[in-house]
Image (tube, grey):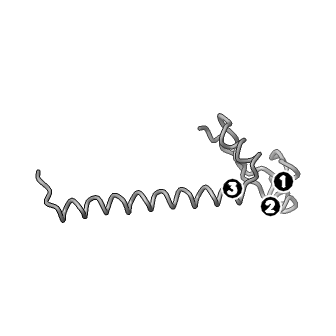
Amino acid sequence: MKLNKPKLIFFVATLLVLFGYSWYTNRAREQKIAEVFSTDTRQILEHSQSFILYSLHPRSLEAEAMGLQANPKFHGYTIMGQTEIKH
C-alpha cells in the first residue's frame, strides 16, 4: 500500500495529536495523584504487593441499629465489606 504525501502528513499529524493527548492526560493524572496523596502514601500504594480496601459504614450507631454490631471495626467504624487489591 502506497501512501501519498497528504495521507502521510495526515497520518503523522494524527499520531502526534494522539501522543500529545496521551502525554498530557498522564501528566495531569500524575499531578492530581500528587495533590491528593502524600509522598509516603503514594510510595506505599505504588510499592506494596497488595492492600485491603474497606467499605465502612459512616455512622456506627446506625450500623448497630441495623444489626451489624458483630461486624469488625476499623478505627471505630463498622466494616461493611472488604476486598484485596493486588498489583
Label 3: which secondary element: helix
Give the residue drawn at x 82%, y 45%: 72
Label 1: which secondary element: strand
Q: Residues within 10 Å of mark 3 (few under 14, many from 20)?
A: few
Q: Position of residue 34 (x, y in %)?
A: 68, 56
What numbered label is drawn on residue 34? Answer: 3
Label 2: which secondary element: loop
Give the residue drawn at x 82%, y 58%: 63
Q: Nearer the viewer, mark 3 or mark 1?
A: 3
What numbered label is drawn on residue 77? Answer: 1
Tell me, yes or no, whether the two marked residues, 1 and 2, touch with CB atoms within 8 Å.
Answer: yes
Give the residue drawn at x 73%, y 54%: 37
What numbered label is drawn on residue 24? Answer: none
Q: Amino acid at mark 1?
A: Tyr
What's the CA distance linking mark 1 and mark 2?
7 Å
Q: Amino acid at mark 2?
A: Pro
Q: Which residue is mark 2?
A: 58
Tell me, yes or no, whether the two marked residues, 3 and 1, touch with CB atoms within 8 Å.
Answer: no
**Left or right: where does residue 32 sit relative to residue 67?**
left
The one of 7 and 73 positioned closer to us in this rendering: 7
Pick out the residue farthest to the top.
49
**Left or right: where does residue 5 sit relative to residue 63?**
left
Comes first in the chain, label 3 or label 1: 3
Q: Amino acid at mark 3?
A: Ala
Location of residue 31 by image quarter:
bottom right
Q: How many marks?
A: 3
Q: Position of residue 39 (x, y in %)?
A: 75, 48
Location of residue 30 by image quarter:
bottom right
* Quadrant of image for the C terminus: top right
